[in-house]
């Protein structure tokens, strides 16, 4: 997938990166859940991106092996273009649910519930957090590029998804196409640098986990994130260390709008 670098023989390799823009009235990136509280991080996590891409590919929850492998292969950097202060929303749910109730699914048909006939009604409470009017840009690539799905298959999937896409939760519907463009770069942070700002701001919070970082990025700290999912059991497990900082952004010129390939 990569081509030899031509910038002075530094021995670095240019790779292809798929650029996604996640923008919606409400977004939920997920974070460590405690009891009935469902918080959201400020940037997309690896399991959330795996679920988004898996949905685009047409994977089902039963395809745990495929989702596990996709999550393992995924490498990315992401930036938030929301500004200095995130606009968070707390939604408190109280619902009385019955075993005969059905819910909408992205498969295009209602899905029933399993339950105990001796206790047919249950009151469910949950505190759910969202980010409002936010936009994030993701530059992603894959380890083992010759395996399926390839980056090209992901490209086609996000352009023509097998099912409707959502960003974290089913109510978080994208307000614009998720696919932005494909870019050749030496690192994910360089791929982000080559992607002009979506919102026109001059700088943004950025997260990455590669050892290399572009000159446009200033590291501020490292943090542990809990964004890895055991897809076979449907639970989040473990933590990983990521870098976070600030990236100086480029501003799109008028002719660059809609320049994706």
Image (cartoon, grey):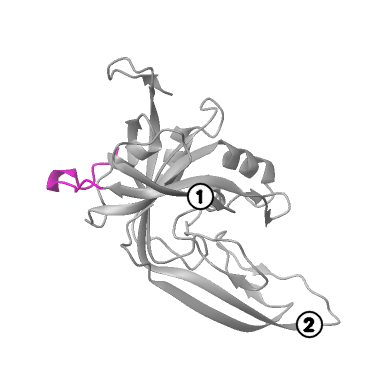
Query: Can the viewer see residue 74 in this picture?
Result: yes
Q: Is residue 140 left or right of residue 99?
A: left
Q: Is residue 149 left or right of residue 180?
A: right
| Mark nearer the N terminus (2 vs 1) | 1
The image position of residue 14, as x and y in percent, is 37, 25
- Relative to 127, say whether 70 is above or below: above
The image position of residue 129, as x and y in percent, is 51, 71
Residue beneath disc 1? 49
Residue 199 included in the magenta stretch of the image: no
10 Å crowding of disc 2: few (<14), some (14-19), many (20+): few
Quadrant, the C terminus: top left
Task: Residue 120: give its label.
Answer: 2
Nearer mark to the viewer, of 2 and 1: 1
Look at the numbered disc 2 and give the secondary structure of its residue. loop
- Give the residues drawn in magenta, as a range: 249-261
Q: Nearer the viewer, residue 139 or 114?
A: 139
- Relative to 77, say whether 177 is above or below: below
């Amino acid at each position: 997938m990569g081509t030899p670098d031509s910038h002075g023989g530094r021995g670095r390799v240019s790779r292809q990166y798929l650029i996604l823009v996640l923008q919606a009235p409400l977004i939920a990136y997920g974070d460590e859940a405690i009891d009935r509280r469902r918080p959201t991080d400020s940037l997309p996590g690896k399991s959330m991106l795996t679920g988004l891409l898996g949905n685009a590919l047409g994977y089902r929850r039963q395809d745990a092996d495929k989702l596990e492998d996709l999550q393992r292969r995924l490498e990315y950097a992401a930036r938030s273009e929301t500004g200095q202060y995130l606009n968070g929303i707390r939604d408190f749910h109280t619902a009385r649910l019955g075993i005969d109730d059905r819910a909408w699914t992205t498969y295009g048909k209602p899905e029933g519930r399993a339950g105990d006939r001796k206790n047919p009604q249950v009151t469910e409470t949950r505190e759910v957090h969202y980010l409002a009017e936010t936009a994030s840009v993701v530059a992603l690539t894959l380890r083992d590029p010759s395996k399926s799905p390839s980056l090209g298959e992901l490209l086609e999937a996000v352009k023509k998804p097998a099912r409707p896409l959502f960003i974290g939760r089913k109510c978080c519907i994208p307000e614009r196409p998720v696919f932005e463009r494909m870019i050749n770069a030496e690192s994910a942070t360089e791929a982000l640098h080559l992607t002009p700002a979506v919102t026109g701001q001059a700088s943004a919070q950025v997260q990455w986990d590669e050892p290399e970082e572009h000159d446009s990025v200033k590291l501020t700290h490292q943090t542990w994130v809990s964004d890895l999912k055991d897809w076979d059991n449907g639970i989040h497990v473990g933590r990983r260390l990521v870098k976070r900082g600030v990236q100086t952004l480029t501003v799109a010129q008028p002719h660059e709008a809609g320049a994706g390939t």
